[in-house]
């Protein structure tokens, strides 16, 4: 068995060299080369890989084609380019639809059920080689063999083959780098910003954060990969989640919407530099630093011209009177007075900013925060004479999957409200006089009661975890 495998591999390598003379594996699977019938429905995989299936079903990979936001933008893109980008967009959003030639037409009338399953089990696991990263240069060999991360895996249903690619960022980088097909502009550079960042150097890959429970680092998930399989120290989780708490919600995938919020909450940290004491009439400066402490790529990433991340800064006095306010959202859903929008701004052929990335020809601005990078914002306000001390300063890093007006334009007014997620919050107080700042209002009795409550809670939690 072992001999046969290595023999097969040797043969492939030999063929490669003789066929191409260079190290390129093969031509990427072309449009319409295969029939969709050779791909296996996810319900078959579910029979033995129930947990993995449960984790994947409902994610944005599962919904990559049905995603209503994608659908609307796809039609726009097709109309704007007289259909030039039809197969381009579909190659990542319905890869089976492309390799089987079921797209075009773009209305989906020829699309099989299996192609509608988006980025699906069998598709991902019959990727047998890749021609690099960006614009989906996958080579697929559908059939009996499933490729994966194990070199000792056995299944009664299929052959298993180890391919190192599955354990590397280059696997994800096939689709998570998008280059404009006509002018070569890099539109989505998730893979590149990872590759150029601190995590690549440390050997932390996409899978460590997105396919383990760790979110910001590798965390082992012991278990069995399939029914009857042996116990392993780590099985990768397939609930691959990013920051999309919006479309997951529209699709009724509450679990993934909540997971996206949790992920966003771990992506960044804030620090606030404000005076402890300041007088009426005084001009106060605030410095707020935002650090991308948890993401392996720039934040935001992906379709980062559409995503929005900004800082809301708010100062109130003791009675709740507002003294300073930026980055709030008005009744129309527009972000008001944010100092900066942390995303990319793409330019069209006239140098005007555009969210229609298929029309982009240049990058006008890139205001995103690199992995482990920090940016700072300065704010200032004057303390009015009639305030009630202490003043409360609060800075909140906010994230939204798309501007409200874009969603209104695509779906109609008042159809979907794009949720605004508070990624992280920092606050401090400003006092009038020295000494007030250190005065902690606490009574020994309350502290003792607090400790008792804590002990009871802790005991309860420990018991629960044992069950
Ligand atoms: C986006 C592509 C993608 C999709 C979709 C996907 N997988 Fe995976 N799968 C991977 C990668 C990558 C790994 C290896 C991760 C690692 O070890 O670092 C993997 C690992 C596995 C493994 C080995 C055990 C483990 O979890 O480590 C099994 C079994 C598996 N997948 C089955 C499935 C099934 C069944 C489905 C559908 C319910 C599925 N996969 C969907 C990419 C995918
Ligand atoms: C009859 C049960 C069964 C069915 C059906 C099944 N598998 Fe598996 N599969 C297994 C078992 C058992 C393993 C071994 C797991 C291990 O080694 O820990 C496995 C392993 C794998 C691996 C790991 C391969 C490697 O070498 O890393 C992948 C990937 C995989 N299956 C994908 C799939 C996909 C995709 C489907 C659906 C098309 C599927 N399986 C259907 C039982 C099954
Ligand atoms: C075959 C192409 C393909 C491969 C391979 C692939 N992805 Fe994706 N991925 C997509 C597409 C397309 C979407 C977007 C679906 C949508 O939003 O409509 C997506 C969505 C995601 C999201 C959700 C983004 C959000 O905003 O919430 C994450 C996270 C993600 N992928 C991570 C990964 C990781 C990690 C890997 C490698 C293990 C990987 N992907 C491999 C195509 C792919
Ligand atoms: C150190 C942990 C870490 C690594 C490594 C990492 N990510 Fe992420 N990823 C995150 C966190 C945290 C977020 C949430 C913040 C955000 O949305 O930008 C995220 C978000 C995303 C999103 C959603 C972006 C958006 O805002 O729409 C995608 C897509 C994604 N990651 C893909 C990848 C890919 C592909 C790789 C490898 C090239 C990768 N990630 C490596 C932690 C990581
Ligand atoms: C090389 C692969 C690839 C190609 C080609 C591609 N996309 Fe995507 N698309 C992705 C990935 C990966 C994501 C997820 C990134 C993120 O979450 O920000 C995505 C996300 C999106 C989203 C955001 C969806 C959401 O739910 O928030 C839209 C809209 C979209 N793509 C439209 C298009 C259109 C239109 C085209 C063609 C002009 C296209 N894509 C071409 C890979 C691709």
Image (cartoon, helix red, strand yellow):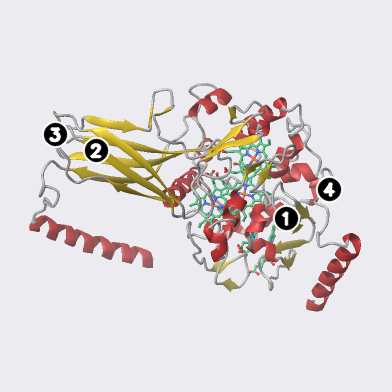
Q: Earlier in the sequence, mark 3 or mark 4?
A: 4
Residue furthest to the bottom in view is: 3
> Circle 1 — which element?
loop
* Few, some or many residues within 10 Å of mark 4 (<14, 14–19, 20+): some
Mark 1 burial class by Cα count in 10 Å: few <14, some 14-19, many 20+ = some
Q: In the picture provided, is 326 more to the left or to the right than 98?
A: left
Label 2 – label 1 distance at C-alpha = 52 Å
Which residue is denoted by mark 2 in the rendering? Answer: 284
Closer to the eye: label 2 or 1: 2
Mark 2, Cα crowd under 10 Å, few <14 / some 14-19 / many 20+, is some
**Quarter-of-image position of residue 225:** bottom right
Q: Earlier in the sequence, mark 1 or mark 4?
A: 4
Q: Is residue 208 in view?
A: no
Above or below, 349 relative to 299: above
Disc 4 secondary structure class: loop
- From the viewer's perspective, is 391 left or right of 96? left
Assign the C terminus to one quadrant of the image: bottom left
At 87% from the left edge and 69% from the top edge, which residue is drawn? 11
- Whole-number angstrom distance, CA of label 3 to CA of label 4: 72 Å
Query: Could you tell me how far apart the alpha carbons at marks 4 and 2 are, in whole angstroms?
Result: 66 Å
Front residue of 352/255: it is 352
- C-alpha gap between disc 1 and disc 3: 62 Å
Position of 129 relative to 224 (above/below): above
The tag on residue 132 is: 1
Q: Which residue is mark 3?
A: 388
Q: On the picture, is 187 further left or further right than 423?
A: right
Q: Position of residue 321 (x, y in %)?
A: 21, 30
Percent x, y of residue 188: 62, 44
Quadrant location of the N terminus in the rendered image: bottom right
């Amino acid at each position: 068995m072992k001999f046969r495998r290595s023999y097969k591999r040797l043969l492939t390598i030999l063929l490669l060299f003789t066929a191409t003379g260079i190290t390129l594996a093969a031509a990427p699977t072309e449009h319409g080369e295969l029939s969709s019938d050779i791909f296996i429905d996810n319900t078959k995989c579910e029979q033995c890989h129930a947990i993995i299936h449960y984790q994947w079903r409902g994610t944005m990979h599962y919904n990559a084609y049905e995603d209503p936001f994608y659908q609307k933008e796809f039609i726009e893109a097709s109309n704007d380019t007289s259909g030039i980008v039809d197969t381009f967009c579909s190659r990542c959003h319905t890869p089976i639809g492309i390799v089987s030639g079921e797209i075009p037409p773009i209305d989906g009338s020829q699309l099989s059920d299996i192609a509608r399953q988006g980025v699906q089990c069998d598709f991902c696991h019959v990727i047998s080689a890749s021609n690099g990263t960006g614009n989906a240069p996958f080579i697929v060999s559908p059939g009996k063999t499933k490729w994966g991360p194990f070199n000792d895996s056995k299944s009664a249903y299929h052959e298993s083959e180890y391919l190192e690619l599955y354990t590397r960022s280059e696997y994800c980088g096939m689709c998570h780098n998008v280059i404009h097909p006509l002018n070569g502009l890099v539109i989505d550079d998730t893979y590149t910003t990872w590759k150029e960042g601190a995590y690549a150097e440390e050997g932390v890959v996409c899978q460590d954060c997105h396919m383990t429970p760790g979110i910001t680092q590798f965390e082992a998930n012991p278990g069995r990969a399939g029914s009857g399989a042996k116990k392993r120290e780590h099985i990768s989780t397939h609930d691959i989640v990013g920051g999309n708490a919006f479309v997951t919600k529209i699709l009724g995938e509450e679990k993934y919407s909540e997971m996206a919020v949790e992920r966003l909450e771990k992506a960044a940290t804030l620090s606030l530099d404000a005076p402890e004491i300041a007088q009426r009439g005084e001009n106060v400066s605030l410095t707020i630093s935002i650090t991308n402490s948890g993401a392996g790529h720039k934040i935001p990433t992906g379709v980062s011209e559409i995503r929005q991340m900004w800082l809301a800064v708010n100062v109130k006095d003791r009675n709740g009177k507002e003294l300073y306010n930026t980055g709030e959202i008005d009744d129309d859903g527009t972000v008001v007075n944010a100092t900066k929008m942390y995303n990319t701004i793409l330019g069209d052929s006239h140098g005007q900013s555009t969210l229609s990335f298929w029309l982009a020809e240049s990058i006008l601005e890139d205001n995103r925060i690199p992995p482990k990078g920090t940016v700072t914002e300065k704010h200032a306000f004057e303390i009015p004479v009639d305030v009630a001390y202490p003043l409360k300063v609060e800075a909140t890093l906010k994230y939204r999957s798309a501007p409200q007006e874009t969603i209104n334009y695509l779906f109609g007014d008042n159809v979907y409200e794009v949720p605004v997620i508070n990624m992280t919050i920092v606050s401090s107080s400003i006092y009038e006089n020295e000494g007030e700042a250190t005065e902690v209002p606490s009574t020994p009795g309350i502290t003792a009661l607090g400790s008792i409550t804590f002990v009871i809670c802790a005991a309860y939690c420990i018991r629960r975890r044992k069950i």
